[in-house]
Image (spheres, grey):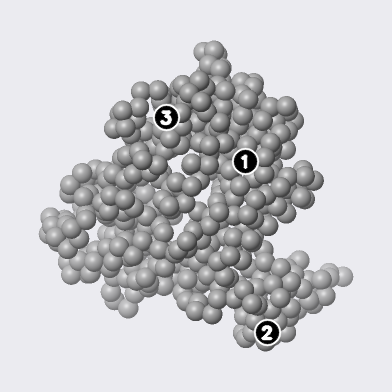
Amino acid sequence: MKNKAPVEKNETYDVNIIDLTYQGMGLAKINDFSIFIENTLPGEEATIKVIKVNKNFGFGKLIKLIKSSKYRVESVDKDYTRTGIAPLQHLKYDAQLQFKQNQIQQLFDKAKMGIKVLPTIGMETPNHYRNKAQIPVKKINGQLETGFYRQHSHDLVPIEDFYIQDPEIDKAIVVVRDILRKYHVSPYDEVNHSGVIRNIMVRRGHYSHQIMIGLITRTKKLPMVDMITKEISQSLPEVKSIMQNINLTDGNALMGKKTICLYGSSHIEDNLLGLKFYISLTSFYQVNPIQTEKLYSLAVEKANLDGTQNVIDAYCGIGTISLAMAKKAKMVYGVEIVKEAIEDAKINAQKNHINNAKFVTGKAEDQMEKWQSQGLKPDVIVVDPPRKGLASSFIDSAAKFAPKRIVYVSCNPSTLVRDARRLADYGYEISEPVQPVDQFPQTVHIESVTVFEKK
């Protein structure tokens, strides 16, 4: 006979919250059966309603708190929880930093690697930090609305203040929304694959205050385009660029392949670590400039450069880390799979009068082999991979170079720990405590810098 879960859907239970998962959900147990509940914290007692029952675990919804945690923040906006914009907003900020440190520490402990993780470097003001927004557009009750999707759905929750975004970006979204309403531009309807405007994207330079507006459309033509761009640029004096990205597909891809400039320049500029960066609509540029300066300064410091070293920057993007390293290195070689990012990186090197940085387009693991055959000998390799971490072929080729140091900037603790074990097989040991940096306050994401040295 099949084991029956000790809880039933739609029933209410009183539970104790015993832990916080890496997704920021409270964990309760009923007869050893795990239930995950949003907006609950360890040490709390709560009445919950079970909303989903799987074979080994279930999900519950908070009905009422019987006992609150001393780490709870009371002024919580339900919309930020429902949409997943700020899943940790109910947890006090110093406790968020501790949660992130613990998350990395527990993974290293589980791997029995004996690694120490330092306290997370946080922000003084842990909100309104994002310099980029990608906001879906939908028709609700007959009018065009902007907001964010409720988690795991395509139901749009209309929102004007996004809490973790630069307030000037929030303001710009409302201005653009109202202008699109005025000219009766129809929002995209994914069921019938009809309508015009799919998303509004806004980027704003933290230091330059230059704004770029991106209008992502399902159609090649944007009706009343001249009136719309003129009105946006007049209403928002900081706008230096209005771009249209054409996405003809009916899937979930955010951007299409073709981008055209409707107004001003095809890029905006901003500064980072005293360097100028040229940012296009599709560039990868870290979204929290204040913390990025801390993160990248740390990476440069940990590389231990004195002007005599060759550095490889794998996953170099538009050259942010490469150019910061170039000031202190003999030569920096950057590789990145996105062609447009490499074009931006080359322009950024020119703009900053940096001549000791070379950038190539390609898969990091393939390019490593090419450099190997060309006889390149790096002293330091810097990696800042996506969430999936390093490909094992990349680790093989990085180890063949036998650099003295590998500086690993990670955005995913579990792939960091996995890669640390693989690097250990090649004699690379973590030589100092891991340093987490909070790039995304109010969310569960965590960045860190780890230094590996060849034994």
Assign a secondary structure to mark 2: strand
Q: Nearer the viewer, mark 1 or mark 3?
A: 3
Q: Mark on residue 450?
A: 1
**Residue at the farthest front position:** 306
Looking at the image, which residue is at 69% across and 78% down?
44
In front here: 129 or 239?
Answer: 129
Looking at the image, which residue is at 27% across and 59% down?
196
C-alpha span from label 2 to label 3: 54 Å
Looking at the image, which residue is at 43% across and 52% down?
290
Assign a secondary structure to mark 1: strand
- What residue is pinned by disc 3? 327
Quadrant containing the C terminus is: top right
Q: Is residue 409 left or right of residue 332?
A: right
Marks 2,3: beta carbons within 8 A: no
C-alpha span from label 1 to label 2: 39 Å
Question: Which of marks 2 and 1 precedes in the sequence?
Answer: 2
Residue 284, image quadrant: top left
Examine the rendered structure and indicate whether residue 268 appears above or below residue 19: above
Residue 19 is situated, as x and y percent measured from the top left of the image, at 71, 68
**Mark 1 crowdedness (10 Å alpha carbons): few <14, some 14-19, many ≥20:** many
Q: Is residue 387 left or right of residue 140?
A: right
C-alpha span from label 1 to label 3: 21 Å
In front here: 309 or 188?
Answer: 309
Answer yes or no: is residue 193 visible. Answer: no
Question: Which of marks 3 and 1 precedes in the sequence?
Answer: 3
In front here: 430 or 172?
Answer: 430
Marks 1,2: beta carbons within 8 A: no
Residue 83 is situated, as x and y percent measured from the top left of the image, at 48, 68
- What residue is pinned by disc 2? 67
Three-letter amino acid code at the position of disc 3: Lys
